[in-house]
Amino acid sequence: DPFSGEVRDGFVWGRGASDQKAGMAAIVYAGKVLRKLGVELPCRFLGVGSVQEEDCDGLCWQYLVREEGLRPDVVVITEPTVCQVYRGHRGRMEIAVQCFGVSAHGSAPERGVNAIYRMAEIVKELEALNERLTRHPILGKGTLVVSDIRSTAPSLCAVADSARVHIDRRLTLGETRESAVAEIQDLPSVQRYDAKVEVLSYAKPTHTGLVYPTDKYYPTWLLSEGDQVLVAAQRAYEGLFGEKCVPGCWTFSTNGVATMGMFGIPTVGFGPGDERFAHAPDERCAVADLTKAVAFYAAFALEFAGGSY
């Protein structure tokens, strides 16, 4: 049962176990542990729970920073990392490309201009563009995927007068919103057919009805080696677990696109569970990961604030 929450064979089973209920539970409990032990931190320890990250990465943090004035000195993302320290991931953006034709009756296609045929040329060039995108030694290669294609016509017996594709663009370090759009605009078929290239927007209401519009551009971020926040995370990890900490990166995206990517707030990742199980019918999180995560969050707070543990 993917909704059971059953604890069996050393795992918590069910949807959201890894992504991301376990992380939320662990960060809250870490605060409880610090208070129970009577630890007095020279800083505020906040566990932040938010909505719509799945739909629009970082939207909640855009609101918290811009509207609520919450700007912490450091953020720990509790998305699943198999209890390893992570320091970034690729960014992403959603782009639409649309081209136009001239409709005509399907019995006489020579009287029209088929927008689907034009788009077919564009799609082939987009596929080729993906193969030559930039590669970064840590974050890997930027990617481009055509994830949806649609067309319009007066009927199914007519030549299509428009065609539109949706692009899921993953951005590695050094790639920007402007460069990603320019690469598509510069394609020969896009120029030949005067296709429209646009970054899409997000404006869906929350559970409260609030609409907080934003562009679907989520910047790449990577905390530098030697950054004091990363060093504090490494020290906390090595002090707790007695092994060398080699920071990694996520494959998927997190709210770090806002905290670090947009606002430059130093951000690290550490979370119970495994991102490979996210959204899977057999999603699970090791119980041992939960206790490790609680310990790490408490230890990191002390390490960053200059305490001991």
Image: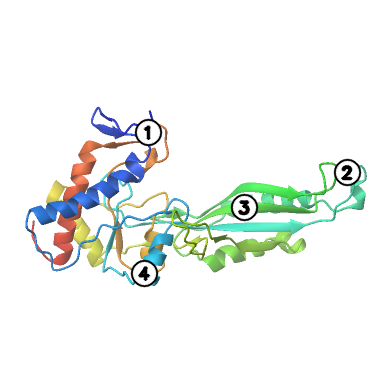
Does label 4 or label 3 sit earlier along the sequence?
4
- Position of residue 121 measured from the top left corner of the image (x, y, whole percent): 73, 51
Depth check: give the residue in front, 249 or 76: 76
Across and down, in percent, residue 298 comes to 16, 55
Q: CA distance from mark 1 to mark 3?
A: 32 Å
Quarter where residue 222 is shown: bottom left
In-image side of 87 versus 122 (left or right): left
Mark toward the start of the polypeptide (2 vs 1): 1
The crowd level at tag 3 (other Cα within 10 Å; few <14, some 14-19, many 20+) is: some
Left or right: 23 in relation to 217: left
Helix or strand or loop: what does disc 3 sit on?
strand
Mark sitting earlier along the chain (3/2): 2
Q: Which mark is residue 106?
A: 2
> Disc 3 marks which residue?
166
Give the secondary structure at mark 4.
Answer: helix
Drawn side of residue 17 relative to residue 96, left or right = left
Task: Give the spatial CA distance, label 1 vs label 4.
Answer: 33 Å
Q: How far is mark 2 from mark 1, CA to CA?
A: 49 Å
Q: Secondary structure at mark 2?
A: loop
**Mark 4 vs mark 3, CA separation in Å:** 30 Å
- The numbered mark, 1 or 3, whose residue comes first in the sequence reads 1
Question: What amino acid is found at the position of numbered circle 1 in the picture?
Answer: Phe
Inspect the image, locate mark 4, and give the three-letter code of the amino acid beneath it: Val
Above or below, 272 relative to 207: above
* Residue 65 circle label: 4
Give how far apart the Cα atoms at labels 2 and 4 are.
Answer: 54 Å
Q: Residues within 10 Å of mark 4 (few under 14, many from 20)?
A: some
Task: Please give the label number shown on residue 3.
Answer: 1
